[in-house]
Amino acid sequence: MALPHPPRGLVAMGGAALYLISPIDLVPEAILGPLGLVDDAGVVAAVVLFVYKLVKARRILADGGIEVGRPGRRSPREPDRR
């Protein structure tokens, strides 16, 4: 039995949150002051754009009649194929 893949958007948001609270930084705020927040803003912007594109792609597929669900789960409209 294969494990289901985690939702990519949630993984990206969790990774961004871990980066933001991590004491390790690419551009440290302690040395550069407010300029050090540039990398944090970049991470947040990248994740927001990534999640937006995921939602948009899912909406386009749904509008085209393609149901995107979790692996191993059937739609209520889909007949049992056993």
Image (tube, rainbow, N blue to C red):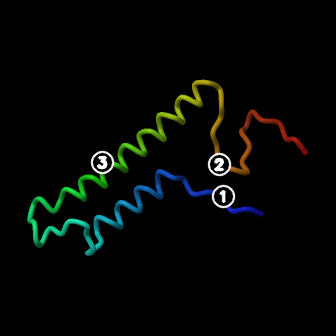
Q: Gap in Å between the C-alphas at discs 1 and 2? A: 7 Å
Q: Position of residue 74 (x, y in %)?
A: 74, 43
Q: Are marks 1 and 2 in contact (CB under 8 Å)?
A: yes
Residue under label 1: 4
- The CA span between labels 1 and 3 is 27 Å
Q: Residues within 10 Å of mark 3 (few under 14, many from 20)?
A: few
> Residue furthest toward the right?
82
Q: Residues within 10 Å of mark 2 (few under 14, many from 20)?
A: few
Q: Which amino acid type is marked by label 2?
A: Arg
Which sits in the foreground, 48 or 27? Answer: 27
Residue 62 percent coordinates (x, y):
59, 30
Does label 1 or label 2 sit earlier along the sequence? 1
Q: Secondary structure at mark 2?
A: loop
Looking at the image, residue 51 sits to the left or right of residue 28; the answer is right
User: Residue 45, labelled with which disc?
Assistant: 3
* Whether residue 37 is situated above or below residue 70 in the rendered picture: below
Name the residue rendered at 61%, 24% in the picture: 64
Specify which label sits upstream in the sequence, 3 or 2.
3
**Which mark is in front, 1 or 3?**
3
| Residue named by callout 2 | 70
Q: Type of residue at label 3?
A: Ala
Taking the spot 47% from the left edge, 34% from the top edge, the residue there is 56
In the rendered image, the residue lying farthest to the bottom is 23
Q: Quadrant of residue 61?
A: top right
Q: Residue at x 41, y 61 (%)?
A: 14
Q: Looking at the figure, which quarter contains the N terminus?
A: bottom right
Q: CA distance from mark 3 to mark 2?
A: 27 Å
